[in-house]
Amino acid sequence: MTGAAGRSGAAGRASQVRARAAIAAMFSVFLLADLAAGWLGVAGLTGFGFAAGSMIAAGLVRRKDLLIVVAAPPAIFLGAVTCGELITAHTDHATSVGSIAAGTFLTLSSAAIWMYCGLAATMIIAVVRGLPQCIRDLRTGLAGGSSRAGGTGIAGGSSRAEGGGRAAARRARRYLTTGPLVAAHEAARRPGSHARLRPPRPSRSQPLPAVPSLQ
């Protein structure tokens, strides 16, 4: 029972390999395979390293990182082959850009069949381990993020409108309590304000103005 528990624990730890560790492992395997193929003169060793590294990474990486491991191998392989050509050109004292580009192209061409087969096998392993669920989770996350962003924008707009309405109401109350209408009302309520506001009446001692005759 102890051996079974140890094997299950090792399997659980192996399935917890992160995407960064898997990418670093694939790059190392691809680079070593390319250098070994150049030094041993076995052209197919580069492609075999690509297929083996991709399948091992797809089998050991965490399930939520399967999408990265499936999509990354071609770019990682291109970088590893380019680095291998740079190292080989440096050891051979031939550092021209044309020779490095030609060597990279020839290596990729010779490993094309291995690349196709390795990608197909990697895809099968990833599908068996739960790649469709990873794609569905990614779509759900993207849809949830967009809906949350839209809801936040609407809520922000409504809160700004509500804040503007409250500010306008405060300004209106301030105007009604301290504005010129209140000042005029207070002046009208003071003693003697009606006498000042009325126009002066003519006294009885003063003669009335003559009305011009129409004749």
Image: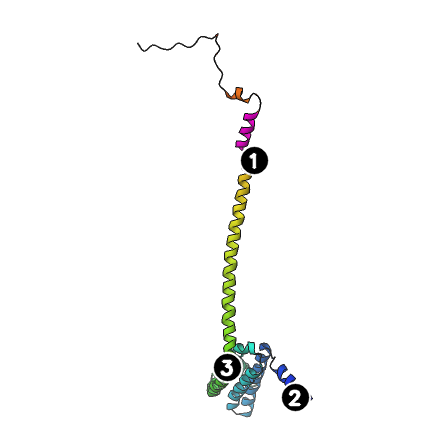
Give the x, y percent position of residue 204: 48, 9
Q: Secondary structure at mark 3?
A: helix
Q: Are marks 3 and 1 in contact (CB under 8 Å)?
A: no
Q: Name the residue tied to disc 2.
A: 4
Is 187 one of the magenta-colored residues?
Answer: yes
Q: Amino acid at mark 3?
A: Val
In the shown orientation, is residue 207 left or right of residue 22? left
Give the x, y percent position of residue 35: 56, 87
Q: Which residues are magenta?
A: 177-189
Q: Name the residue tied to disc 3.
A: 127
Query: With respect to residue 183, does 172 lie above or below?
Result: below
Q: Name the residue tied to disc 1.
A: 177
**Which quadrant is home to the N terminus?**
bottom right
**How many numbered tags mark residues here?**
3
Distance of label 3 from label 1 (alpha carbons): 73 Å
Q: Do we see residue 160 in this rendering? A: yes
N-term mark: 2 or 3:
2
In the shown orientation, is residue 209 left or right of residue 52? left
Residue at 60% from the left image edge and 77% from the top image edge: 18
**Which quadrant is home to the C terminus?**
top left
Q: Do we see residue 93 in this rendering? A: no
Q: Residues within 10 Å of mark 1 (few under 14, many from 20)?
A: few
